[in-house]
Amino acid sequence: MSLLRCILGDLRGRGQLLRTFVTSPLSSTIRPTRRDVRPPQQVRFLSQGRDSAAAAKLKLRTRLLVTLLFGGGIMAVWWFVHWEKQQKLRRQRVEQLRQVALGQGTFSLLDHHGRRRTKQDFLGSWVLLYFGFTHCPDICPDELDKLSAVVASLDRDASLPPVQPLFITVDPDRDDVAALARYVQDFHPRLIGLTGTTEEVKHAGRDYRVYASAGPKDEDGDYIVDHTILIYLVSPDGLFLDYYNRMKNQEQIAESVKNHINSYVRI
Amino acid sequence: MTAPNSAERKACWDARDLLWKCLDDNGDRAESCQKFQSEFEAKCPAQWVKYFAKRRDFLKYKEKMQKEGFKPAEGPQEAS
């Protein structure tokens, strides 16, 4: 209670101060001599409660108004400081996550037209990345179909930037530029197939911790490559942001990508 | 050797599904599904035939595990 009285007293003081601010410039410009008249006027203001009911009402209203303004001001400042701190913590966390994210490295590979493409070419756009091979019996085509459907559904949302689908082979011995050109035709029109030397391809995969191991060859020299079958979401700064396994369906992936795009913070 | 294209993949998968259905309906007796087996082998690369055979075993095993749960093998009983 005494605290409240203290605050109110303080506010009253402030109210007076405010009134002095309002009246003094006016009075000084209009009539400098009025300065002599002011002290009695102030006294009247201070002791107005006794004078009339109307004045008391005015006083109460002013007090209330000032209290609200002042209290609101404190709340606003507190809220702003709190919000700013939260923002700072969030930025710090994003920064920390970025430092440990996969995909810090780079790659330099040939696309299915035979042009050299590096990771820098894709910076600034959202990428869905899949590692596989063209002789893959069922999983790769399934996943690439799913990936294509996800990209197509995101394309229909005009508020989102276009997502770039990429396919990097884990079987560069058989998947040359021509093989990839044939293969990507079956999927999303923007899908880019990437290949290179064994070393280049391995380097690209290592950056995302991709495992790939070719199985034994049969009489025709055919073999199956066992490999990581995840779809990676890469942010516009080229870092790994999320992954989707076989259990995730098209709708779940599209929803997740959309959320990532909407909540993404640029450095 | 070029990889199967989209139409060839589809033909292979369809042949595989027919064979698998036949095997399911006939209690996994391969002799009852000879026709589907040869069709499957004709439409799929040899490596895929082997792969899908293993894949079916795996899927069957997975289904069994999900339905019945894992039962640890009974080891040597400890004398009490």
Image (cartoon, rainbow, N blue to C red):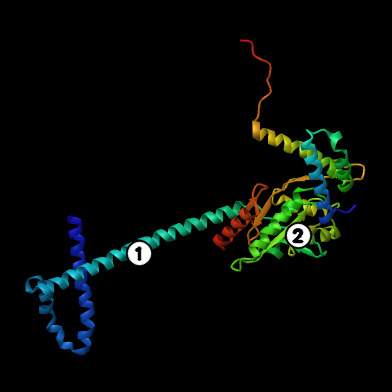
Residue at horizontal 72 percent and vertical 34 percent from the top: B61
Left or right for B46, reference A52: right
Question: Of callouts 1 and 2, which one flags the residue occurring earlier in the amino acid sequence?
Answer: 1
Q: What residue appears at the point 12 percent right and 79 percent down from the top-left corner?
A: A41
Q: Quadrant of residue B34?
A: top right
The residue lying at 24 percent from left, 66 percent from top is A67
Helix, strand or loop at label 1? It is helix
Q: Chain of mark 2?
A: A
Instruction: Tell me if mark 1 has few (under 14), some (14-19) or many (20+) residues whose alpha carbon lies within 10 angstroms of its own.
Output: few
| Discs 1 and 2 lie in a common subunit | yes
A226, above or below A204, in the image: above
Q: CA distance from mark 1 to mark 2?
A: 53 Å
- Quadrant for residue A40, please give it: bottom left
Residue A77 can be seen in this image: yes
Of residue A252 and residue A211, the one placed in the foreground of this image is A252
Quarter of the image with the C terminus of chain B is: top right
Task: Examine the rendered structure and indicate whether residue A73 appears above or below residue B10.
Answer: below
Q: Which of the labelled discs sits on residue A187, or is there none?
A: 2
Q: Residue under circle 1? A: A76
Residue type of the residue flagged with mark 1: Ala
Find residue A116 and name its label.
Answer: none
Q: Position of residue A195 (x, y in %)?
A: 80, 57
Q: Where's residue A250, x and y in %?
A: 65, 54
> What residue type is disc 2 on?
Phe
Q: Is residue A11 left or right of residue A252?
A: left
- Residue A124 seen in the figure: no
